[in-house]
Amino acid sequence: GAVVSQHPSRVICKSGTSVKIECRSLDFQATTMFWYRQFPKQSLMLMATSNEGSKATYEQGVEKDKFLINHASLTLSTLTVTSAHPEDSSFYICSGDRGTDTQYFGPGTRLTVL
Amino acid sequence: GIQVEQSPPDLILQEGANSTLRCNFSDSVNNLQWFHQNPWGQLINLFYIPSGTKQNGRLSATTVATERYSLLYISSSQTTDSGVYFCAVDRGSTLGRLYFGRGTQLTVWP
């Protein structure tokens, strides 16, 4: 149990466009979902924490107007990168917490902005 | 925030060898997890171990919370063990925020 999926797994877009990434908990209800960003050969950096039905809490330095997070239900959270630029290219990973102090991670989405 | 340091940063082994990965953290924690990130980027939960010792097959982990460190042991390593091993901790805040170390890149050669 505790499977998290992400869609798409890979996306290439032009500079200035918006990209939506979906994160779903397939076999559990995620009390909280987290979005991370990982640059090549680096660690995971938390971007924001979201709870179903409420506004996301963003980490310091993360632009909330650029990285829009919607946690529509206990099994779905979306991250929208608005007006993407090449510096937004990265590996984005979500995770879900079912209230047991253990986070379960999705397979990640590789975003490339041309 | 809490500091998480992992060592060594890189480790190269021949198949069959044993290894120990270390994670030091700067403050008391409520949660500590070890993850393996495979070459495709998927993070796989290995252990939830805020204290004590756990074993799962060839892997085992020990956390000494009072001394603020955790160890991950890999015995009889296999090529499929290659990847990055991360330690992540949570201080017990209501947000469940995980602080990640920089990881140990393990390469196992046949």
Image (tube, coloured by chain):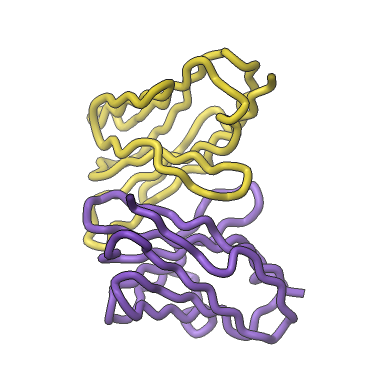
Chain colours: A purple, B yellow
Looking at the image, how many numbered discs can be counted on the residues?
Answer: 0
Work out whether A111 lies above or below B34.
Answer: below
From the top left corner, tell me how far across and down residue A83 is, in percent.
Answer: 63, 85
Q: Position of residue B13 (x, y in %)?
A: 63, 19
* Residue B109 vs residue A68, the one in the foreground: B109
B107 vs B2: above or below: above
Q: Residue at x 55, y 78 (%)?
A: A20
The image quadrant of residue B63 is top left
Where is B92 relative to A54, above or below?
Answer: above
The answer to whether A20 is drawn above or below residue B34 in the figure is below
Asked whether, in this view, residue A28 is left or right of residue B39, the answer is left
Q: Quadrant of residue B26?
A: top left
Q: Position of residue A7 (x, y in %)?
A: 54, 68
Task: Say left or right for A12 vs B101.
Answer: right
Q: Residue at x 53, y 73 (%)?
A: A21
State the residue at coordinates (31%, 77%): A73
User: Could you tell whether B67 is left or right of A91 in the image?
Assistant: left
Front residue of A42/A95: it is A95
